[in-house]
Image: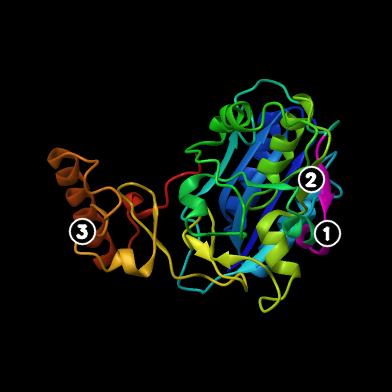
Amino acid sequence: MHVIAFYKFVPLTDLESLRRELDAFCREHDIVGTTLIAEEGINGTMAGLEAAIGGLRDKLRKIPGLADLQFKASQTSDDNPVFLRTKIRIKNEIVALGQGAIDVVGQTGEHVDPQTWHTLLDDPDVTVIDTRNSYEIEVGSFPGAIDPQTRSFKDFPEFVEENLAGREHEPVAMFCTGGIRCEKASAYLKEQGFSKVFQLNGGVLGYLESVPAESNRWQGECFVFDQRVAVDKQLKEGDYIQCHACRRPLSPEQARSPEFKEGVSCPLCIGETSDEAREGFEERQRQVALAEQRGQRHIGAQMPEKG
């Protein structure tokens, strides 16, 4: 299975026609995954066989404004479907910050390559921020990066107000999984008066794709929003699994905990759910197991959507 991740902030129109066109193409060519389209642009991760994914690349680049659309590619084992369904959806934002219209096309941070990124990591005067959510950061990050302790990207403006106000003259460098959150986060900082804003071009996935594992600075694995859960420094499927009760990624050690029961609970959520909720999870997991015995896939086994 070939996996491509892509995004671009660009004005799009006639969204419903575009949605229908992409949905029909993906279903015809057995391509699965999620793509979001909005008036501000497109954001997706899709998976399929090599020829089908090549055709999707070509089709996307024929859409007005997307001729230079960039893709981050990876592969996964044949026994991992990555995604279970095809979802092409219209949204208000392709990555939700909740701050209304932000001019991402007109102003954003300076995109830097891996070599420049290493220089920024080594500069004590640069504030390096991981703009992803805390459960993603726990899986892996760059050394010294600040965890803003957000549960949702919509929490990022509050972090800025509480931690960066008055420091608009200081350099800030940010990164995220594929680059899209940084595009909007850096544009937001520019609107707030920050003058020296940098972002890792292509995000962590682009960085891992271009910098050999033995010489890159990434520590741990990188969380991804699909069935793989996380990828390692060589962009191969990692060791993490996901708790389908609370959606959090689990390390091999956490998965061995007596509090982990597949589809029902894990050491991170065991105290957060009621007995009634766990009974419901147990019934769902029983249905998943029955479906697998019949050679089918149960909807309860799918990865939850990106929030």
Tell me residue 95's x, y (percent): 62, 36
C-beta proximity under 8 Å, tags 2 and 1: yes
Tell me residue 298's x, y (percent): 32, 54
Q: Is any part of residue 182 visible from this angle?
A: yes
Tell me the magenta residue range.
Answer: 108-118
- Label 2, secondary structure: give it: strand
- Label 1, secondary structure: give it: helix
The local crowd at label 3, few if under 14, some if 14 to 19, many if 20 or more residues have their Cα within 10 Å, is some
- Compare residues 169 and 285 and report the one nearer the observer: 169
Sequence order check, earlier mark of 2 and 1: 1
Quadrant in the picture for residue 217: bottom right
Q: Amino acid at mark 1?
A: Thr
Q: Amino acid at mark 3?
A: Glu
Q: Which residue is mark 1?
A: 116
Sequence order check, earlier mark of 2 and 3: 2
The local crowd at label 1, few if under 14, some if 14 to 19, many if 20 or more residues have their Cα within 10 Å, is few
Vertical side of 125 occupied by 122: above or below: below
Along the horizontal axis of the image, is 61 left or right of 148? Answer: right
Tell me residue 245's x, y (percent): 30, 48
Q: Which residue is mark 2?
A: 198
- Compare residues 8 and 252 and report the one nearer the observer: 252
- Compare residues 278 and 13 and report the one nearer the observer: 278
Q: Is residue 245 magenta?
A: no
Q: Which residue is mark 3?
A: 259
Sequence order check, earlier mark of 3 and 1: 1
| Cα separation between marks 2 and 1 | 10 Å
C-beta proximity under 8 Å, tags 3 and 1: no
Residue at coordinates 81% horizontally, 40% vertically from top-left?
109
| Cα separation between marks 2 and 3 | 42 Å
Along the horizontal axis of the image, is 54 left or right of 150? Answer: right
Residue at coordinates 67% horizontally, 52% vertically from top-left?
178
- Label 3, secondary structure: give it: loop
